[in-house]
Image (cartoon, rainbow, N blue to C red):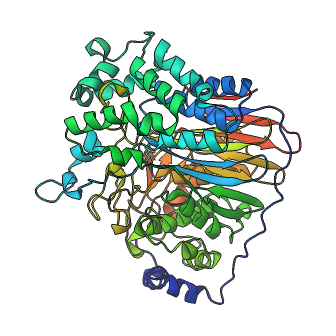
Amino acid sequence: MKLSGSWNVRALALSLLFTGASAFAFADGAPRTTPKPAPAAVAQKPGHAAIASANFLATEAGFEVLSKGGNAFDAAIAVASTLSVVEPESSGIGGGFMGVLRTAGGHESFIDARETAPAAVNPKDYLNADGTPNRDTSLNGPLSAGIPGEPAGLVLLAQKYGKLPLTVSLAPAIHAARDGFKPDPRLRGSIAERVKDLNRWPASAAKFLPGGKPPAEGELWRDPNQARTLEALAAHGLAGFYQGETAEALVKAVKAAGGDWTLKDLATYRAKERTPVAVDYHGYHIVTAPPPSSGGVAIAEILNILSGFDLAGLDEAHRTHLVIEAMRRAFRDHNDYLGDPDFVKMPLDMLLSPYYADGLRQSILPDKATPSSMLPAVSARDPGMHTTHFSIIDKDGNMIGITTTVNYILGSTFVAGDTGVLLNDEMDDFALVPNMPNVYGLLGSKANAPEPGKRPLSSMSPSLVLGKDRSAVIGSPGGSTIITQVLEGILAFVDGKSATGIAAQKRYHHQFLPDRVDVEDGVFDAATADALKRMGYDLHPREPWGYMNVVTWDHQTNALDAASDPRRPSGLGKVQ
Ligand code: DON
């Protein structure tokens, strides 16, 4: 579609987007967004607890640990470790997580338990002879795996924030692994989908294909090896996984299958606490993911752009138009600039500045889509359907949201020897070849190139939305769509929706490239869809995506609400 005045849009966009300096220059004289002060700290205690996760056994494990005197952080350890056993297609102790938390006393923090590249990482291992990406080495087997972060993240949570020893908080997961559980249809389907790859590694086939086949419906499935590994973690903390027998078995199995991990890679791994990204929007204080996630920066940029518009006063088509344009501009930035903060310098002050957002806002036309081709191109991502998120608020008002992953379905499909640990394939989240898309369509820059010890860029965006009257913990899996799902969840919460309403809400997604709006069936009524098409949007129907798990807290009544995404049947949101 040809736009009238398109040259002006291009000139404007180029002047805005090539450098931060020109964005500031353009913004000069334009209406500016003044950051609103954060609301008063949440001081009440709900008196009961809410947990929402993607698997009912994991939600129940969280409540079991709360009943033993644990707090939200102990419950988070129980939920994450149980998901490792009962939802291994999405996350596990062979992967990594990112978590945002707030203690009842008001301390906010972010746990980065993301995997790291091993010291021997060799970018050439991920290239074919003609220089194109080798999807097999980046997605399957030991070369695709980063050094796991999840065990260290759980230990950090227990030591710094929990009340109970790991022997108690890991007990439900150990029980599920040792005594067995009935895999749900999603797990059985995931195993069936990856039979070919699982059969390449004897320990993987032994774990996931008992008797040569995926577990049958109703069959009890056990993994005593993973139970033993979890027991070592429970008994010895970090040393139980990253040193001694487990570490030796991991390194031996990886090396025997063509990977290159050392005992030092494991012994030196540390989960890190980072300062979360914070942004204020319409009286709410949003606490979200900093790099090495791109999610929080993108969400903050979008909310900063939107805070200069009166969204409530617009019809749905115009409101959606502005949200999509804000998404487009934030996604344009995110892969270009962002990477592991321990390795790359990032212009975060610029990207998070309300003045930068003011400049971007000025480039949005009132009634027309801006084709992405008119903005200087950077990169794009496509979504996936694995990874998992859970949200918890306990009786004292401690809050935590964790998004955890092994990356692709069943990660690398590589189980390391007799440890029962399924390794991730997070190496594919690096920009292995600059400007060549990864499995999610990612075109990354040097900022996200693989280097020894570096963390690959993530989209995981667990977020807290803190208000004077209501607060929420929101998050979801879904690759790049995590960012837009969480954004739409925040906007819905600010509009007054309940946890159930937020999780059920229909979704749309734009990520700069490809230049189209992915739409879930029914997200727009016919009139809104027509209006958006007339503005120049390519509406692209897609199967439903995401697996959102939300908890909310009404500070007036102390009522809690918990909801698991209705698109998937095995989750459970529960208040007790
Ligand atoms: O960290 C990331 O952004 C990806 N490894 C997450 C992958 C994901 O969410 C897949 N899909 N649901």
Q: Nearer the viewer, residue 225 or 310?
A: 225
Q: How many marks?
A: 0
Q: Residue 486: image x %, image y %? A: 59, 50
- Compared to 491, does 54 lie above or below? above
Report whether 158 appears left or right of 312. left
Q: Is residue 293 above or below residue 197?
A: below
Residue 368 in picture, x, y percent from top left? 52, 70
The quadrant of the picture occupied by the N terminus is bottom left
Residue sticking out furthest to the left: 129
Of residue 442 and residue 492, the one placed in the foreground of this image is: 442
- Would residue 266 appear left or right of 81 to someone viewing this image? left
Image quadrant where residue 442 sits: bottom left
Residue 521 seen in this snapshot:
no
Q: Residue at x 47, y 45 (%)?
A: 478
Q: Residue furthest right?
A: 556
Looking at the picture, how far across and down is residue 16, in whole percent?
A: 50, 82
Give me the residue at 55% from left, 40% from top: 155
| Residue 12 in view here | yes
Vertical side of 364 occupied by 98: above or below: above
Seen in the picture, residue 345 relative to 150 is either above or below; the reply is: below
Q: Could you tell me residue 324's position as x and y percent? A: 54, 61
**Quarter of the image that includes the C terminus:** top right
What residue is rendered at 26% in x and 33% in y?
A: 253
Front in this rendered view, residue 370 or 132:
132
